[in-house]
Image: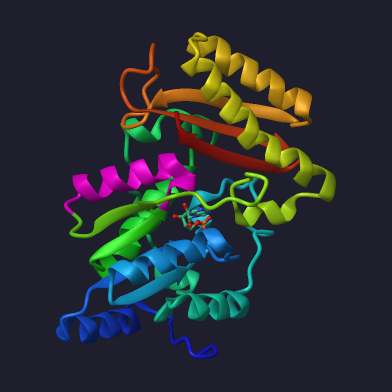
């Protein structure tokens, strides 16, 4: 227990809680997280609580979605603080498995989603979606909730998880939820904690430059030119480098020639050692 929030540490404890709720005819929602919770995560918990009777949040910093040079070791961890925030948001159970529960010795399975995993994040973090799809498949099958809730903040991830659940006939509805932002427009992220005060000021420019880019393409600027201009503006604003600013088909993430179908702008840029991502509808 932590405060009033019960914690399940293994699959058996998770399943026995869910089985009891199901037997009582209750709908179960799951919010997967890596912890270091902020208002973005808590908004998912509140939405889940509106739509389901019982809400489980999972907390697992998934080693398989970090490359060896990435920030797995220094990723912020605060289980007790997270549990208190979750209890306050109406969460009913925290599922916090050990690494050996998720990946017992000899674990040899990878879930690879092709197609929508390939561009953008897939190009710059080739290990990432395999790690995400594998851990989310496990979380969904371990709990078999009615609905699992994911943020549009990680828009490509949401598309990958929807495709994976559909392709594998996993009987869990996947629900996307809007991005929660700071007052200056910066998308909330556990990684924002890495930013120095000076970097934090620059970080908000990402969202503003994406808005300007949307305005420009809506006014008729060719997409490739608007993307290149956004990259120049990000560097001028103080970003160290830009992985991509790209305007894509909102369903397939394929490059587009015009705005006739639903469209999304997606960006990833570095401030020092911190990588920020953001996206929005065009
Ligand atoms: P993470 O702990 O970063 O793996 O995120 C867990 C879940 O919270 C994912 O579904 C994210 O997309 C979602 N999330 C993270 N940041 C935000 C945000 N600012 N607004 C809405 N959802 C978010």
Image height of 246 relative to 174, above or below: above
Q: Nearer the viewer, residue 38 or 34?
A: 38
Q: Which residues are magenta?
A: 151-169
User: In which quarter of the view is residue 229 placed?
Assistant: top right
Q: Position of residue 232 (x, y in %)?
A: 70, 18
User: Magenta: predominant secondary structure element?
Assistant: helix
Residue 175 is left or right of residue 276, and the answer is left
Q: Nearer the viewer, residue 72 or 48?
A: 48
Quarter of the image where one finds residue 267:
top right
Q: Between 211 and 264, which is closer to the camera in this rendering?
A: 211
Picture residue at 74% right of the left edge, 31% below the top: 239
For the point 69% across and 35% down, the residue is 205
Residue 161 in magenta?
yes
Residue 40 can be seen in this image:
yes
> Magenta stretch containing residue 166, yes or no?
yes
Residue 280 in the image: x percent, y percent? 48, 36
From where the camera sits, is residue 103 visible?
Answer: no
Identify whether 124 is placed above or below 84.
above
Question: Which residue is at a point 58% across and 76% down the rendered structure image?
Answer: 79
Image check: 94 left or right of 21? right
Residue at 25 percent of width and 50 percent of height: 165
Q: Which colour scheme appears in the figure?
A: rainbow
Which quarter of the rendering shows the C terminus? top left
Residue 148 shown left or right of residue 217 in the figure:
left
- Image location of residue 83, percent across then percent down: 54, 79
Q: Position of residue 17 (x, y in %)?
A: 29, 84
Q: Is 262 placed above or below 78 here?
A: above
């Amino acid at each position: 227990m932590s405060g009033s929030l019960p914690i399940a540490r293994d699959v058996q404890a998770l399943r026995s809680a869910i089985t009891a709720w199901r037997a009582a005819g209750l709908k179960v929602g799951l919010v997967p997280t890596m912890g270091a919770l902020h208002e973005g995560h808590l908004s998912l918990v509140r939405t889940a609580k509106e739509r389901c009777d019982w809400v489980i949040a999972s907390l697992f910093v998934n080693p398989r979605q970090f490359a060896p040079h990435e920030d797995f070791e220094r990723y912020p961890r605060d289980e007790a603080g997270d549990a208190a925030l979750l209890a306050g948001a109406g969460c009913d159970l925290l599922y916090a498995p050990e690494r050996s529960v998720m990946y017992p010795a000899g674990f040899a399975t990878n879930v690879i989603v092709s197609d929508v995993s390939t561009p953008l994040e897939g190009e710059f973090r080739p290990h990432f979606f395999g790690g995400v799809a594998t851990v989310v498949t496990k979380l969904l099958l371990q709990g078999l909730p009615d609905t699992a809730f994911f943020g549009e903040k990680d828009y490509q991830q949401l598309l990958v998880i929807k495709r994976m659940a559909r392709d594998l006939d996993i009987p869990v509805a996947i629900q996307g939820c809007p991005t929660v932002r700071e007052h200056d427009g910066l998308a909330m992220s556990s990684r924002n904690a890495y930013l120095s005060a000076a970097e934090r000021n620059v970080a908000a420019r990402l969202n503003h430059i994406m808005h300007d880019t949307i305005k420009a393409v809506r006014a008729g600027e060719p997409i490739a030119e608007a993307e290149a201009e956004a990259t120049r503006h990000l560097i001028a604003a103080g970003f160290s480098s830009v992985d991509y600013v790209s305007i894509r088909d909102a369903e397939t993430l394929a490059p587009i020639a015009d705005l006739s179908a639903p469209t999304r702008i997606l960006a990833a840029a570095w401030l020092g050692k911190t990588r920020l991502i953001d996206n929005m509808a065009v």
